[in-house]
Amino acid sequence: MQHQRFVLLALLAAAAPLAAQQGFLTQWEQRATHTQAQQPAWPPPLVTTYVGLIQVARVDFLRQTASNQVQAWYLDGSKGLNLVPFAKTEVDINLPPYVEHSAPSTPNGAGDMSFVWKYRPFSGNAQHGSYDVSAFLLATLPTGSYKNGGLDATVSPNLGLGKGFGPFDVQSTLGASLPVADTATLGRTIAWNTAGQLHLARHFWPEIEFNSTWFKGGPNDGKNQTFATPGLLVAHGLRTSATASRLAICVGAGEQIATSGFHTYNHGIAITTRLLF
């Protein structure tokens, strides 16, 4: 009898942490579901930062080609894991990309790691205005090897706005990249990215993005560059209600085309793979 009581107590002790873990995960999922049900069901654009909140594991592949045909592959594309840990809040952990150059004189290596904190104070789903307003802060750490990353850490405050018009939506972000040191050498940049998406045939989202950067100080002082990026996203299972499944997949590709006289590379191919949960 004493032995049976001991076994029962051991089983209860082993089950308690598991029940607590399941309770934590259930609360997290319910909180994320409630938060995302208050915003439109748009897929994240290829380049422009998503203005809503999302939980996703994302891996991108970017190939940039300079005017002299020298190429650089960014494997992972500075993406990673996006989480919704609190109401109206998202935290991103972006892994450093691996940069591979076609020029033998340029060493390959890892890029910089980055983190994002995003807060979405205002939003409405498709039945309540179809819009998003968010603010986010991007921070990068100089983890890159050789010259594949920055010399210093940077902080980048941004504002994001999105509005839907039936099957069409526009998402736009405006922000600045501010080095924490060596500002006179590195300079500052202002980035304005805008994406227009059209929802077709249930799973297809053709889009066009415009990505502009203005340089203040540093080696490109006074210059600006703009890329136009036509692309296509294929999404299955995007959340359209609080009762829909949390799992979804999204893949896509597009090409960046330089439209300004000055550009740090001529064109680029962007490929994205995402698992939403």
Image (cartoon, rainbow, N blue to C red):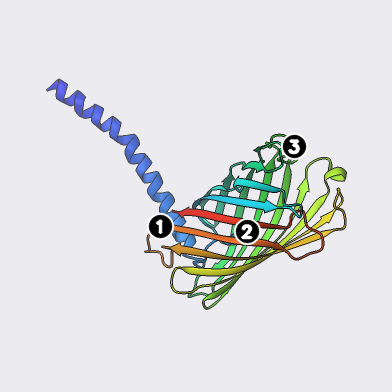
Q: Which mark is residue 47?
A: 2
In the rendered image, is residue 129 in sight? no
Closer to viewer: mark 1 or mark 2? 2
Instruction: Give whichever of discs 1 and 3 has the lower sequence position.
Output: 3
Q: Which mark is residue 144?
A: none
Q: Residue furthest bottom?
A: 166
Judging by the rendered image, the residue that carries numbered circle 3 is 105
Contact, mark 1 vs mark 2 (Cβ under 8 Å): no
Q: Position of residue 103 (x, y in %)?
A: 71, 42
Closer to viewer: mark 3 or mark 2? 3
Of 166 and 219, the residue lying toward us: 219
Amino acid under disc 1: Arg
Q: Quadrant of the N terminus?
A: top left
Q: Position of residue 187 (x, y in %)?
A: 83, 48
Contact, mark 3 vs mark 2 (Cβ under 8 Å): no
Real-space Cα separation, disc 1 to disc 3, in angstroms = 46 Å
In the rendered image, is residue 198 in sight? yes
Q: Residue at x 56, y 60 (%)?
A: 253
Of helix, strand and loop, which one carries label 2? loop
Q: Is residue 118 above or below residue 102?
A: below
Q: Residue furthest top?
A: 2
Judging by the rendered image, the residue that carries numbered circle 1 is 246
